[in-house]
Structures are given as structure tokens and as C-alpha cells.
Image (tube, rainbow, N blue to C red):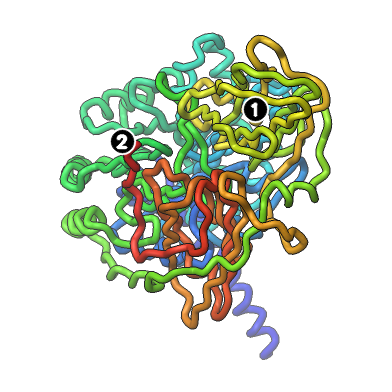
Amino acid sequence: MTRFFCCLVALVLVVTSYAQRKTTSFEIKDGKFLYNGESVQIHSGEIHYARIPKEYWQHRLRMVKAMGLNTIATYVFWNYHNTAPGVWDFQSENRNLTEFIKLAQQEGLFVILRPGPYACAEWEFGGYPWWLVKNKDLVIRANNKAFLDSCHQYINKLAGQVKSLQITQGGPIIMVQVENEFGSYVSQRKDIPLAEHRQYNQTIYQYLQQAGFNVPFFTSDGTWLFEGGSLPGVLPTANGEGSIENLKKAVNQYHQNQGPYMVAEFYPGWLDHWGEPFVRIGTESIAQQTEKYLQNQVHFNLYMVHGGTNFGFTSGANYNDEHDIQPDITSYDYDAPISEAGWATPKYMALRDMMKKYVSYPVPEIPARMSVLKAQDIAVSKAVSFFEWKNSIKPVTSNAPLSFEDLNQGSGYVLYSKKFNQPIQGTLRVEGLRDYALVYVNGRKVGELNRQANVYTLDIDIPFNGRLDLLVENMGRVNYGARITESTKGIVAPVRINDYEITGDWKMYSFPFQHVPVTNSVPAKPTAGLPAIYRGTLETNQPGDVFLDMQGWGKGIVFVNGHHAGRYWKVGPQQTLYIPGCWLQKGKNEFVIFEQQHDTEHNVLKTVEAPILESIPAE
């Protein structure tokens, strides 16, 4: 009898659980978003799990909830999970997307998934894996079989991780985006027939459906770009649209003359490039626009509500008429309401106050800040010469310089070295530079080339039996615009002195810096003017967040306890690097700095208690 009763209870629980899943729904109907049949407003904020240490995910989600939002949106970066051909990673570091989504549900937040395959987001190559371009039959973001086959594989792999977390199965995912800002790309690539563009976009939509995504889909574009980016039967949403009239008119035209009306990217801040002023957007104007949306029942997603950090080599790049490339800074603070370190800003407080006036659900208290270590100096205990260390690397030899891709390298640096058995002088021309190079003759720095500043030439004098070295850095692949297809890095065209092409016996040393460089066996101390690798130790009894003060340093990268914190560059506007306290441990913590320019020798690495993101030194 007892056994029968237990079985009966178990059956009731299973049936009840199934019934609950069956009744959980989110749909677009009669111009509204309906959650379990009831009209609901979407007040969303975008955060990217890849840009936040997983130990801080819950804190940031709670910050979003405490600002009065009920939804989070996140991109999925294909290249963050597909790290090499056939290699997929949904577990290491900040890659456990499933855990992130479950945490969002635990905090009572809906989730909007933006899987791409193209993301943009100021992320390296817009989210595409760099090695795709090694396939000569493949055309990026086009109705091209090789590319679509790769997209199909990615979408299926992603669906295997997250489709069970859709609201139709009791999870928090309420909507999925198809591609991203495709109307913008259509407008930039008029050389491709519109029918071809549309076939590509439709195919991506079909792949998402076939993979098992069955919640409402949406597209995202500027309202004036819906013609190229919208899809039949899919909700078009607007990016950056402040006019309610324009929003409704555009959505009505492409969505059967009805809503819902959503601004999928409402910008409370903006992106930032090296060497350009940090962009600030006023709190008052953002608060006023938010109230305008709330008063008119416009759904919105704040892009970004919290930006986070482009750790490692994950930052992308743009370009314009003045700069052949505009590399994005390491910080993705974005002037967002929640700062890079997770702090509530005045913008956050203003928006929180505004949301509390309009929403019917409770808004929780603001979580406490993560602790920050007091400012202190980190003694640099060991430094070695990069040129001595490179002797431990076996070079590749070729008649002409090879690109990063030809060297099977995605990011970091390549040292291009060439010996001359006759003297030569004149103008060095490296018009195929991608993106930044320090130039040395016989181990002495003679200048730099810089694609960001459109500097590709340098007067040079190489003596008999001399050696030319070019230390070339990939500053991030383009993530937006027509030139996203021009993603090759390193030296991608002939090197010339005057009009003479330099060929024969080029040696290339690869430095992807995927891991901390091992320099224990390198005895040589560095010389000012030549690249160096520094090591320092920070001891602490109570770990906390740290802001490394890189003022006085030149250009390079930093590792902390094996974590790649990203780039620094004296041109600003960013002068500090954010180090999450969860990377530190009680006791000794190792800092490793690769200093490329090294115009000054160092014996200390300073820290400060607040970020410096708006400093561009006078020339």
C-alpha cells in the first residue's frame, strides 16, 4: 500500500510538472507580448556573459534587477565557444552559457538570446571565428554554401546547449534574434543582389527553427533599414530609435500594421576607440527617453546596461574616413548605467528612480559593491628581454611575409625578421600592415608603423649584414561594416624599400600569447627601447578588485594569475586595466606585463582605487 501511494504521488508530481511546463508561454498576439496569456512589458538590459567573470554573474544580474528591469539580453559570440576547427567549449572560464541563463531565471529575469551568427558588439571579428577565412571557398556573411554550412553547425551546437531553456520548456528564454543588424549590411553591400541577401537571411532563420528554437523571433535594425533586414512573419525591432512615431510607422509597415513596438538597442552610452575621446551620454537625456518609452508602452533593451571588459584579445575594431582601423579599447564600460566594475552610477540611480515610478513589480535593493583593494605599488621583481626570449621560438621561413592566418595564428603578435647581405636605405613601405608594428634595425628601435594613424612608411637605413625586425600586432578584426570581409592580419602585402620588394628568407616568430609567457630560462635584462617582459608580485590578505595604473607605460598586455586582462596603450583614453578581485587569491599574486614600446624601464606597477578612462595625453 505504501509503495502504491508513493508511486501515485510521484505520478501526480510528474503530471503537475508537465502541466506547468505546458502552460508556460510567451507569444506575440494582437500587437502585444503575452506571458501566459497576459500582456507584459519588456524592460530589458543587455549584458554579455563573456565580458564578466562568471564569479560576478549573479552580482551583475542582481544589479540589473535592482535597476527595475525584468529581462536581460545577451549575445552569443560564436568564436568564444568554437575556439578552433572542431573544438567547442561551453565550460571553461566565462563560457558556461547554460549556467548564466539559469542564474538569470533564478533571479527572476526573462532572457532574450541573440545568437547571431553575426554579433558585432565591438567584439573581435563580430563573433566569427578567425579561421573561417582560411577556407578560400568561404565568403563571410553571404549566401555562400561553405559559410552557411559553418553557420548551420554553430547554430546546432548552440541549440544543443540552450534550447531546453526556452520558456516553452520552463526556462527563461522568451525571444531569439535572427542574425543582427542585417539591414545595415545590406545597405553597405549594394554590390550583392538583394535577392542573395534575403536568401542568406532566410536560411539563417530556417536553421534556427530547425535547430529547435520555438519562441518568438525578431530582427533588429535601424527603422530606415527594415527593408533589407526584416523577415516575413518575424517581429522587426528598432535600434537607436527615439521617435515613437517613426518606430510605430516602421514596425506597422513590416508587421501587419501592428506591434508590439520595441527598441532592441536603446543606447545609454557608446563605444570607445584607442586614441579618441571617451564618449559620455548625459543622464538627463537618457532618463527622459526612458520615460517616453514607459509612457507609450514601448518595450526596450538598454544596450548596454552593463558593458564589462574585453579581456584578452576579444576587442574588435571599426574604421572610418579618417582611420583605416579604429581598435576598440579593452574596457567595455560603455558609459553604461552599471560601470565596468559593477558600480551603480548616477545614470543607474536616475533610471532606477524612473522605473520605480512606472513598474508594478517590486524593485529590490541595490547589491553592495565588490570590494576594491587600497591603492598600492606592486614591485617588479624580474624583467627579461623579449628578443632574447624569442630565441626559444622556432620560426617559420618563407620567401615573403606570411599573414597570421597563413601561420595558423588568430591573435597576438608576429615578429617578422629579415637579414640583408647588402646595405639598403630609403623609405620602408608596409602598406599591407595589419595593424601596428615596431621597427628595429640590428636590435635598435627606429620607429613605428600604425594603421590606426594611417602610417605605413618610415625612413630606414640598413647596413651591410644588417637585420630588419618588425614586431606586428593584431589590434582586433573589424566587427562592423562592409570591410568585415577584409579580416586578414599581420603583413598581407609585399614589404618594400623604395620601390624594391623585399623577398627571400623572411623568418616569422609567432607569439599568440594565449598563455602566460615562460621566461625562467632567459637571463638577459631588458634594454630601454626594446620589448620586455616584466613580472611582479602582489601580496594580499583579502582579495578585491584592482585598477592597474598603466600611465607611464607604453603599449602592451597584462596577465594576472594566468588570466589575460587585455591591452593597454598610452594614447588613451583608457589608462587603467580592471582586474576582478575573483582572479586574486589570498597570499601571492603574479602579474606579468609584456611591454612592447618600452621607452622607459620600470621597477613598479601602480594601482589606483578608481578607473581612468578619459585621459588622452597631449602630443
Cβ atoms at labels 2 and 1 below 8 Å apart: no
Q: Position of residue 211 (x, y in %)?
A: 65, 41
- The kind of secondary structure element at disc 1 is loop
Q: Is residue 368 above or below residue 35?
A: below
Q: Residue placed at 73% from the left, 43% from the top?
A: 84
Q: Residue 176 carries which label?
A: none
Quarter-wise, where is residue 246 in the image?
A: top left
Quarter-wise, where is residue 129 in the image?
A: top right
Q: Residue 261 carries which label?
A: 2
Name the quarter where the C terminus is drawn: top left
Q: In this view, does 492 lie to the left or right of 351?
A: right
Q: Residue placed at 22% from the left, 59% from the top?
A: 349
Residue type highlighted by circle 2: Tyr
The furthest residue to the bottom: 2
Query: Alpha-carbon distance for marks 2 and 1?
Result: 40 Å
Q: Is residue 593 above or below residue 437?
A: below
Q: In this view, does 354 lie to the left or right of 544?
A: left
Q: Is residue 138 left or right of residue 560?
A: right
Residue type highlighted by circle 1: Thr
Q: Nearer the viewer, residue 251 or 375?
A: 375
Q: Residue under circle 1?
A: 488
Question: Is residue 117 among the parts visible in the rendering?
Answer: no
- The kind of secondary structure element at disc 2 is loop
Q: Residue placed at 73% from the left, 18% from the top?
A: 502
Q: Position of residue 214 (x, y in %)?
A: 55, 43
Name the quarter where the N terminus is drawn: bottom right
Q: Which of marks 2 and 1 is nearer the N terminus?
A: 2
